[in-house]
Amino acid sequence: MTGKQLDNEVYDKKIKDILNKNTDKPYLEGFKNWAKPRRSRRTIYNYLLYVLHFLNYINKDIKEIELDDYAKYADAQSNLSSSNQIAKYSAIKCFSKYLKASRKIDYDFMDGAERPKFVESQETKQKREEKYLTIKQMHQMFRNIEIGVGNERALWLQNDYRSRDMAIVMVFLTTGIRITALRNMNVDDIDFENSCIKVTDKGDKVNIHNIPEETKTVLRKWLLKREEILTKANKMDEQALFISNEKRRLSDTGVRTVVDKYSRSITDGNKKITPHALRATFGTLLYDRTHDIELVRQQMNHESVATTQRYIRGNEETNRRRTADVMGSIVSSGKKRDTGSLFGEE
């Protein structure tokens, strides 16, 4: 069973539990079926949670809901992060659209509702800016994987899975894929001949990422070790590329543990490095070398450049310095036109 199939099974069960607990709202089943072809199971599950939260708050029959009800609800959610507010807005808007399309209501009560603006507090922005690796820290992380970290028992346990851990980190840093995409990868998703990997990304989109020779090398090493491990355990039918100590597909928690384990000692306690931070590192380093935001957007599979810009760390300070240098050179060019005294010259 693929990672995506396992995900679907988990969320299908969660969705079923929600529907079973809310049999007094039979339209939720219809909403689920209507929205399902265009959205992932995870999204459907979250949409159901948000819609139920909204319905419980306003405590009205669906035929009586008005725009003012949503406005009051949105105001009550204004203390939440803008991302959370936007997610709830999207779910309720989709729900309203379904109710009208299925003729359960005569009008779309979300018609005219404005999408919340994405806003970050300075504190949140500062924390986000810190979550990436410099080139020096990245190489320190590689070194940690090579020699191991922790006590004697930890080092012993890492022996069999050192090549796996290096492959995980290298795939993150050289492709910028999301954690779910990495976890869901199977062995046959690697195309060594064409130097690329195939991943199932957000929204069930299948994307192709080219990989450098260095990543191909560590993947080959891991595949040899993986075959040895699974042969000993008599589990050669396992399809997952990255497996756990239990010889089954590595979980999201398992992937996060790998990243945290080898990065914890290299940031002086100032940064919490996660798979998402490695994705930001990919975006930051690619932009630093190319200064091509559209290229970075495409490689990170973002729909908008605005989203990509939030992944590029330290860019604001760099741009401020660059701007100051440019403007300084412009105004300095006027020194030759009898304005030298303005710049401290006599």
Image (spheres, rainbow, N blue to C red):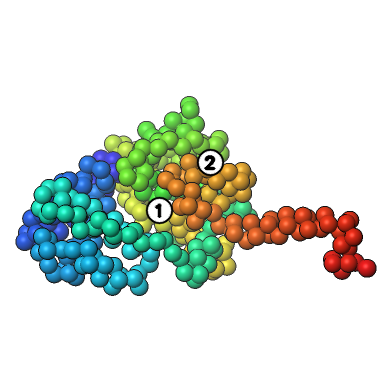
- Picture quadrant of residue 133: bottom right
Query: Between residues 230 and 307, which one lies in front from this camera angle?
Result: 307
Task: Give the quarter of the figure containing the C terminus.
Answer: bottom right
Q: Residue at x 28, y 36 (%)?
A: 237
Question: Does residue 162 appear anywhere in the picture?
Answer: no
Crowding around mark 2 (Cα neighbors within 10 Å: few <14, some 14 to 19, many 20+) is: some
**Image side of residue 302 versus residue 316, left or right:** left
Q: Secondary structure at mark 2?
A: helix
Label 1 amino acid? Val
Which of the numbered marks, if any, corresponds to residue 302? none
**Image side of residue 41 versus residue 314, left or right:** left
Task: Give the quarter of the figure containing the N terminus.
Answer: top left
How far across and how far down the image is residue 289, in percent? 63, 45
Query: Between residues 22 and 113, which one lies in front from this camera angle?
Result: 113
Query: Between residues 78 and 239, which one lies in front from this camera angle?
Result: 78
Label 2 amino acid? Leu
Per the image, the residue denoted by label 2 is: 295
Q: Residue at x 12, y 63 (%)?
A: 64
Question: Does residue 109 appear anywhere in the picture?
Answer: yes
How far across and how far down the image is residue 236, in percent? 31, 36
View extreme (front): residue: 338
How far across and how far down the image is residue 173, in percent? 51, 47
Q: How many marks?
A: 2
Crowding around mark 1 (Cα neighbors within 10 Å: few <14, some 14 to 19, many 20+) is: many
**Dot placed on the residue nearer the N-terminal end, 2 or 1:** 1
> Please, is residue 317 above or below residue 75 in the view?
above
> Please, is residue 26 above or below residue 57 in the view?
above
Per the image, the residue denoted by label 1 is: 255
Q: Residue at x 53, y 62 (%)?
A: 129
View extreme (right): residue: 346
Q: Secondary structure at mark 1?
A: helix
- Marks 1 and 2: in contact by CB < 8 Å? no
